[in-house]
Amino acid sequence: MKSSNFLGAILISAAVGWGGFCAAHLTAPKVQESLPSPQQGAVALAPVASETPAPEPSVEFTDEAAAPAVQAVAEAGPDQSDPVAAAVEFEDVEILAGVEQEVIQATLRGNGRERMTAQLRNNSPAPLRVAIAAGQVLESGRNRVVVTRAAVAELMPARSVELSLSTAALHSANVIGETLYRPSYHNAERLEGFLLWAGLCGEISSAAMQTAILALTENLPLSAFAKFSLSNGGAAQHNTDGFRAETADILAALTALRESGVKLETIALAADPQLRIESMIEPMSREAAKRYFGISEEREWEFWKRELIEGNPTTRHYALFGIARFYPNVAIEMLPKWAREAQTHPVYRLAAVQALADTQRFEALPILRQIATEVGAQTELGKAATQSAEYLDKRLTELATRSQVVAFRDRSRVGGL
């Protein structure tokens, strides 16, 4: 009896197991049909409560249709962490070819110098990666500019995006002002090596970039770029006011040209002797000038002394201003002697009086007024002394009401003059 019960239990268990197997076998195809195939891609499953909205793209697209899969990027490739962008295959096209083939609609608006806005639209049925290479020339009438930094835009069909491009004028005769540009077949062969170096070696200010490019394309002299007056009375061949740069930017341009491999002995801008002393006088460019011209901290006084005694005849007296600015104690002792000495050349006497005001020292104020009295208030030197005293008095009043921005060094133990 017990054997019969045991055998019955075994048969019942087997029947239940067989039924479950059949049920699983019949439902398996339906479950498989609900899962994606390998060709359809993987599906990421996550709890709804933990989902975080993706940040909005930082570029504003002009079309109001569905949001694009990817956004425009400058000097970078697509975001490989974006699964949508990674799944899209873009066709590469240069802006000139794209515009010629009418697959890209480009509206380019620039100021003829450093600024250009490019609005690009993909008119093709395929996703496009539009490249704007460094060295691409854009033109508007006689105006020509060159792209100085490469840019890339990835566009889905019927999408638009706006890019800001870095450019520089190829000619100093460019008219400065907003106007429409178009891609050009012209090239800028002289700039290829420099632009390649600039793209690999970090940032350079737009003013320095512009100065360097005009130095390469037109080999303009210092008079075309400098904001200070030229001692030799030189002037640019035509109006270049739109391309004048701060002395520090001129030095940065020459430094970049030298580091990129350009032979500076062929560059007119680098040959003018006034640049060295002007850049050393100007506090904002002085440190850059010391690096560019190889003037160490220990040998700076020797530089001013040599410029004053042996420098270019047209700029020797400029050294008095450098001494006044950076060695004020020495200047307070030395400059009144130069101003009062009748045998001294009038140019040096006048420079000594004017430089006393650059010391920004209260002690120089009574000295200037005394010199005006001694030489006569109506003489050229007396008028200069009076004007310098008035300037210094005003400057001291301004400095008394705010903290001094530029600190001048005070060395009273240098000598030799």
Image (cartoon, helix red, strand yellow):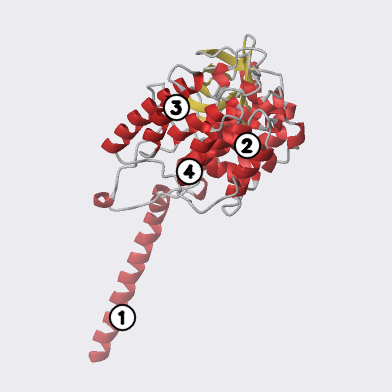
What amino acid is found at the position of numbered circle 3 in the picture? Glu
What amino acid is found at the position of numbered circle 1 in the picture? Ile
Q: Nearer the viewer, mark 1 or mark 2?
A: 2
Identify residue for label 4.
333
Neighbour class for label 2 at 10 Å: few (<14), some, many (≥20)? some
Q: Nearer the viewer, mark 4 or mark 3?
A: 3
- Distance in Å between CA atoms under marks 4 and 3: 18 Å
Q: Nearer the viewer, mark 1 or mark 4?
A: 4
**Where residue 294 appears, x then y in whole percent?**
64, 48
Identify residue for label 1.
10
- Distance in Å between CA atoms under marks 1 and 4: 121 Å
**Where residue 265 appears, x then y in whole percent?**
76, 35
State the SS at label 2: helix
**Where residue 36 appears, x then y in whole percent?**
44, 48
**Image quarter hosting the N terminus:** bottom left
Q: Nearer the viewer, mark 3 or mark 1?
A: 3
Identify residue for label 2.
276
Above or below, comparing residue 50 to residue 213 in the picture:
below
What amino acid is found at the position of numbered circle 4 in the picture? Glu
Ranked by sequence position, the earlier of labels 4 and 3 is: 4
Front residue (pair 60, 187): 187
Front residue (pair 103, 165): 165
Front residue (pair 107, 109): 109
Viewer can see residue 84:
yes
